[in-house]
């Protein structure tokens, strides 16, 4: 039951934030203009120093227009993070090139972790406003996490079908995978030492690949 709820929520969020297109290539919306402006503000000064007035000015809209859609800056930033993470995650899904599922899935996860870790918006938030991320680490699943759980579960079921992923409860496996990759995205900077090749990002990417392979192999 919980898995179905996560799937429905994730699918709805992918539609809302443009991860699923209608076949016409998808069109940018007025929301995108505001979220682009919010991203520029956050990258410039961080979330706490960004105001609705700043965002409205950059977006070329009135503050009242923003208030009708978002009550405060943090709500806009929450939607911005969802758009950025969902769009990034969707773009990193490995194509079905005929290879078995597990190696494609693991490679996509390792690439995704590195891409997320280097994402300028995430880096800025961790540097200046890390408390924004705490609810999604300690308290509840956020919108993008629901989307990733859905995508992971779909991949794991495909891996069960082709025999390359250990058969187990797919929703539980998806959550376990998310816990692993999330820690490598958010906590890796505290462990990395790029001055030492054995402790640099490349070495930890290979360590993550090893963990995921051992975790998912039949």
Image: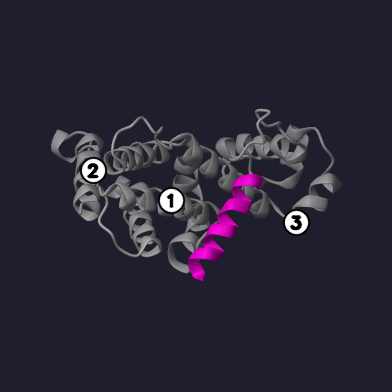
Specify the quadrant of the image occupied by residue 26.
Answer: top right
Residues packed near mark 1 inside 10 Å, few (<14), some (14 to 19) or many (20 plus): some
On the image, numbered disc 3 is attached to which residue? 71
Please name the residue shown 53% across and 64% down the image. 4
What percent of the width, then of the height, locates residue 31?
73, 40
Residue projecting furthest to the left: 198
What percent of the width, then of the height, locates residue 198?
14, 38
Q: Which of 141 and 124 lies nearest the eye of the viewer? A: 141
What percent of the width, then of the height, locates residue 162?
30, 46
Dot in front, 1 or 2? 1
Q: Are marks 3 and 1 in contact (CB under 8 Å)?
A: no
On the image, numbered disc 1 is attached to which residue? 154
Q: CA distance from mark 3 to mark 1?
A: 35 Å
On the image, numbered disc 2 is attached to which residue? 209
Along the polypeptide, which appears first: circle 3 or circle 1?
3
Q: CA distance from mark 1 to mark 2?
A: 20 Å
What range is drawn magenta here? 1-15
Specify the quadrant of the image occupied by residue 58.
Answer: top right
Q: Which of 127 and 178 lies nearest the eye of the viewer? A: 178
Which secondary structure, mark 1? helix
Along the polypeptide, which appears first: circle 1 or circle 2?
1
Residue 78 visible? The answer is no
Which secondary structure, mark 3? loop
On the rendered structure, is 129 left or right of 167? Answer: right
Which secondary structure, mark 2? helix
Dot in front, 2 or 3? 2
Please tell me whether the stretch drawn in magenta is mainly helix, strand or loop.
Answer: helix
């Amino acid at each position: 039951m919980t898995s179905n709820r996560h799937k429905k929520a994730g699918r709805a969020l992918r539609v809302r934030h443009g991860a699923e297109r209608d076949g016409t290539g998808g069109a940018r919306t007025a929301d995108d203009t505001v979220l682009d402006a919010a991203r520029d503000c956050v990258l410039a000064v961080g979330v706490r120093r960004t105001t609705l007035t700043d965002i409205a000015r950059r977006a070329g809209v009135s503050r009242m227009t923003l208030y009708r859609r978002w009550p405060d800056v943090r709500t806009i930033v929450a939607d911005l993070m969802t758009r950025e993470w969902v769009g990034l995650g969707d773009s990193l899904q490995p194509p079905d090139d005929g290879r078995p599922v597990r190696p494609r899935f693991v490679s996509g996860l390792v690439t995704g972790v590195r891409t997320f870790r280097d994402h300028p918006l995430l880096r800025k938030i961790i540097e200046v406003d890390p408390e924004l991320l705490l609810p999604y680490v300690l308290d509840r699943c956020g919108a993008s996490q629901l989307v990733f759980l859905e995508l992971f579960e779909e991949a794991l079921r495909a891996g069960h079908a082709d025999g390359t992923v250990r058969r187990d409860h797919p929703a539980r496996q998806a959550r376990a995978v998310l816990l692993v990759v999330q820690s490598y995205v958010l906590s890796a900077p505290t462990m990395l030492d790029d001055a030492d090749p054995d402790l640099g990002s490349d070495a930890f990417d290979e360590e993550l690949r090893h963990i995921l392979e051992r975790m998912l192999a039949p």
